Every structure is written in structure tokens, then in C-alpha cells.
Image: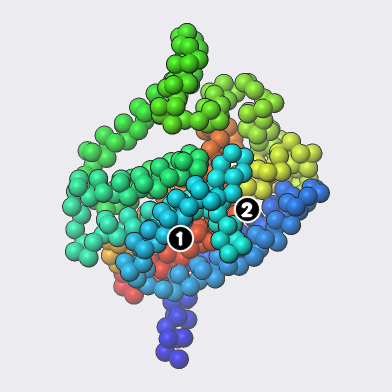
Amino acid sequence: MSAIRENVGRVGRMNWVMNLAVLLLIATGVLFIFSATHAREDSTVGLWRQQVVWAAAGLLCYVVTALTDYRHLRDMAWGFYAMALILLVAVLFFGTRIYGARRWLMLFGVGVQPSELGKIAVILAGTCLMAPPADKFEGRPRMGWSFLLAGVPMLLIMKEPDLGSALVCVPLIMAMLFAAGAPVRPMVALVVTGVLAVTVVLAAVALPEKLGVSAETQDRFFRTIRVSAYQRDRIEVFLQPGKDPMGTGWNKRQSQIAVGSGGLTGKGYLKGTQNILGFLPKTVAPTDFIFAVIAEEWGFAGAAGVLAAYAVLVVAGLYSAMVARDKMGRILCVGIVALLFTHVFVNVAMTMGLVPIVGIPLPLISYGGTFMVITLFSLGLIQSVYVRRQGI
């Protein structure tokens, strides 16, 4: 009975504004997965039902994680990290190939996306590395180990290839290092180096033809920096919006039309013509481009409401970091917030054509079982830190 009373007390101490935002986003996701697929006559019609099942499993995981002491992660983080690496290697050999990439692994009849496990594994193991029991950050040597810890999954994810998911690891490990008290000067140097590297890649895509560089030299350069022809085409479409509108640039262009045509209040639920008429392809409408469906049918007002719900989660996560009772809780919350914010920012910006298309889903809304469960597990960890905050 005492254990039951303790858990009831913990439920009462949860951040219920955050709980409400989570439920609203999940409900929005189910509604618009249905909207994105209801006019189809294929297997995508029932995706919303599958999403309900995944959401139920994820919510159970969310509650159990919130009621469990996050400090027990020290006993499981490295094992989880090792398991994620094994699955990331396994998917390269045994994964299901879809559109030229091996990103899915069938385990006991269930499709699992190891890259999602890899991202949370980096956060869990990184938290334990940066917040040792002595609660003392050791400066640059530990920074090196932190980047190595993130770098191994990144390289494996890039081999699938999934450049978008791989790059997500960079901002989250940087945010965690900042929260851990890493020296500012080397971190600034790393940020500047990263910006310069991105600038070089963008310039290499945009300028060679104008400078008269041969196609063979261009191909050799991109092979050296591990940028595939498909990724290069996406960058070119981003830099030159009018290029290949019927091919590589199709999704980007149709998404922008959907977002822009929604106006202030939208065309109405289930009335989005870009989706119904198939201009937003069925393969991306319920996943990476679901924000375009929302913006077309609910307009600026609805899209702003969705972003406001995400803002609640970000603020709740940062507040949990502020009131955390120890360094481990603070770093853990910051890492999860960085992961959530990066996904939302890149997905929405991609939908509106502000960044290249990299195939990053929208948390709690885009269709996807592994992503849904892992996202709710991560948010449950934030609740676990909040429930055990200072003064409790």
C-alpha cells in the first residue's frame, strides 16, 4: 500500500501542463495522420490506427519512466548504448532497404528504427559520462570522450544513409556539454569550425559549375566528404529553388504551396487539396511533411498552436533542468530538450523550404512507432527529474 501511495503522490507532483501538451500533440498527430491518408486507397489508410497503438504503448512508457527514479540510469545507460550500437551495425547488414536506405530492422515481427535508439542512447550515456558520481566535470579530456561517444553512432547512422538523424547528435551533445560546465572557448571554436565546414559544403555545391570545375572533380570531392548524389541534389534544390521542380524539388515545392495556401485559418479539416489531390506524396504526407498538412487545413492559427504546444514542452524541460536536484538531472533534461527542439525546428523549417530536406520527423505528430515510443520515454525522463526536484 505504501508503494501505491508513493506513486500516487508522484503522479500528483508531475508537471500537468506538460502532460496536457503531450496529449494535445499526440491527438493532433492522430487526427492529421488520418487526414493525410483518408483519401488514399492503399495500405496507408489505416496508419492512424497503428499510431494510436504506438501512442498507447508510448504513454505507458511515459508514465512508468516518470514514476521511476532517473538516477537508476547509471545502471543501464552503457548497456543501452551498447545495444543501440549493435542494432545500428545490424541494420546495415540485415535492415530492410527502402528507397535506397537501410533504416529499419525487423525484430519479433516489429519494425524498429535503430537510429532513434542511437540518439537517446547518446543522451543517456553522455549524461553518465558528464555527471560522474563525484559530480566534477574534468574539462577537455571528457569533452573528447563525449564527442567520441556521439561520433560512433553518427557514423553508423550516416552509413544507412540517414544524414538528418546523424546530424541531430551534434546540437544535443553540445547542449549537454554546456550544461555540464565545459570550457566555453573550445566549444566556441568547435561551433565556428562547424559553421565553416557547412559553408564549404554549400559553396562546393553552388559554385563549381560557375567556376568551371569539372564534373569528375566535383564527384571526387563529394565522395571524399561522404555526401551522396541524393543528398547533393537536395542541397542544390535548396540553393536553387527553381531547379528540378518535377523531380528532386517536388516535395519541397508542394509543401511550400500547402503551407502558404492555408492562410490564417486554413481550408478546413479533411479539406486540404494539396494532400487530397496527391501533390503531397502519400509516402511523406503522414511522416516528414505532416506539418504541411496541418498548416494547409488549420492555417497559421493552427500551426502556431502546434508550435505553442512544443514551446510548452521546451520550457517545461528547461525548468526541470533548473530545479533538478543534481547535475545528472540537469544534463539529462538539457539533452532531451535539445533533441526535441532540433527535431521541431528542422522539420518545420524543412517544410517551409528554409533548410534542405533531411527527412526528420515531427515529435509526437509524425507517423512512426519507434520514434513515438522513444520520444515519450525521453519526455518521461524529464518528468522523472521534475517529480524529484529540489525541495521534494
Disc 2 marks a residue whose amino acid type is Tyr
Q: Position of residue 351 (x, y in %)?
A: 60, 38
The residue carrying pointer 2 sits among few (fewer than 14), some (14 to 19) or many (20 or more) residues within 10 Å by Cα, namely many
Q: Residue at x 25, y 47 (%)?
A: 143
Residue 180 versus residue 135 in the image, above or below = above
Disc 2 marks which residue?
367
Residue 329 versus residue 265 in the image, above or below = below
Disc 1 marks which residue?
378
Asked whether 157 or 384 is in front, the reply is 157
- Residue 134: image quadrant is bottom left
Disc 1 marks a residue whose amino acid type is Ser
Q: Residue at x 46, y 86 (%)?
A: 4
Asked whether 184 or 311 is in front, the reply is 184
Q: How is the image coloured?
A: rainbow
| SS for dot 2 | loop
Q: Position of residue 12 (x, y in %)?
A: 47, 76
Q: Residue at x 42, y 89 (%)?
A: 2
Tell which residue pokes out farthest to the bottom in this image. Answer: 1
| SS for dot 1 | helix
Asked whether 78 or 216 is in front, the reply is 216
Q: Residue at x 46, y 41 (%)?
A: 159
